[in-house]
Image (cartoon, grey):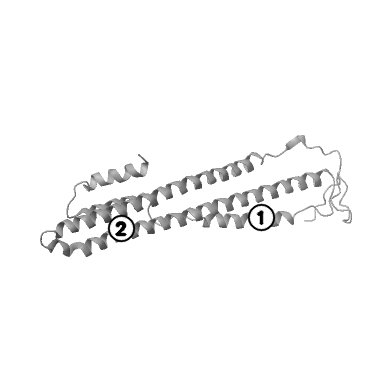
Amino acid sequence: MSAISELIEGIAGRAGSKDVGPDLLDHGRTIIAGLKGATGEGDPETGDAFARARSTFDGVNETLKSAVPVGWDGPGAYAYADQNTRQQLRSEAMADADDAVRTVLDREATQIRMRRDHLDDQYNFLANTSRVTSPLQFVPRYGEAMQLAIKIGALQSALGESSYQVNQLQAEVALNAAELQQAVGRYAGVADGAELPGAELDFAAPVRLGADNPPGPPAGTPLRDVR
């Protein structure tokens, strides 16, 4: 038995819907309300925060691209340019990971809203069925039997559809979780590659970053205090 089926049975047992009676559809609505409650409370979380983070990293990356050494070469320029490039790659990777998370959260929020709407439809369907079948109880001889037959059919239909919708949401959430796990791996990859190289850099070969740029001060030239 699936987890959703067990949930339905548990809620049904607490509501007493195994006892066929005049409040049968009320118990059905209780079950559907319980299923809707399993989707959480309030508005589902969207990816707005991650969209803002993506925008921030894009801005950082543009700043880094404009911060290349100009008119400066030698070991210091090489180390600076190398770290600048590495940081650009990190910020791009973080921006891409944020965008992936935003996409998943936005999609899941839409999925949750859609399933809740379906559950509301079934809840209202049972309420309407209860209202329109109420006069049947006054029909002599067969009225109550007719009323009960309609209620049972409506209940089976509504609970079947509600169970299907929640099972679909359960499958979608599982896929979303797998994608989020991949995004977490991308964040971890950025963190793992963020260590400074330290002394293992080879500064033996100076590199001029732009042939047309005027040379900077020779290595070892003291800085002049202009205060």
Instruction: Please give the label number shown on residue 111.
Output: none
- Residue 96 in view (yes/no): yes
Give 72 or 190, whichever is nearer the viewer. Answer: 190
Which residue shows up at 24% across the image and 53% down it?
Answer: 152
Q: Quadrant of residue 213?
A: bottom right
Q: Using a 10 Å C-alpha cutoff, classify the residue at mark 1 as few (fewer than 14 neighbours), some (14 to 19) or many (20 or more).
A: some
Marks counted in the figure total 2
Q: Position of residue 31 (x, y in %)?
A: 29, 50
Q: Using a 10 Å C-alpha cutoff, classify the residue at mark 2 as few (fewer than 14 neighbours), some (14 to 19) or many (20 or more).
A: many
Name the N-terminal-most of marks 1 and 2: 1
> 33 above or below 5?
below
Q: Position of residue 141 (x, y in %)?
A: 10, 59
Q: Quadrant of residue 127?
A: bottom left
Which image quarter is the C terminus in? bottom right
* Residue matched to label 2: 123
Q: Secondary structure at mark 1?
A: helix
Q: Is 148 left, or right, of 66 in this rendering? A: left
- Which amino acid type corresponds to the residue marked 1 in the rendered image? Val
Q: Secondary structure at mark 2?
A: helix
* Residue matched to label 1: 60
Which residue shows up at 76% across the image and 45% down it?
Answer: 82
Q: Is 144 left, or right, of 165 in this rendering? A: left
Give 158 or 6, whichever is nearer the viewer. Answer: 158
- Residue 39 in view (yes/no): no
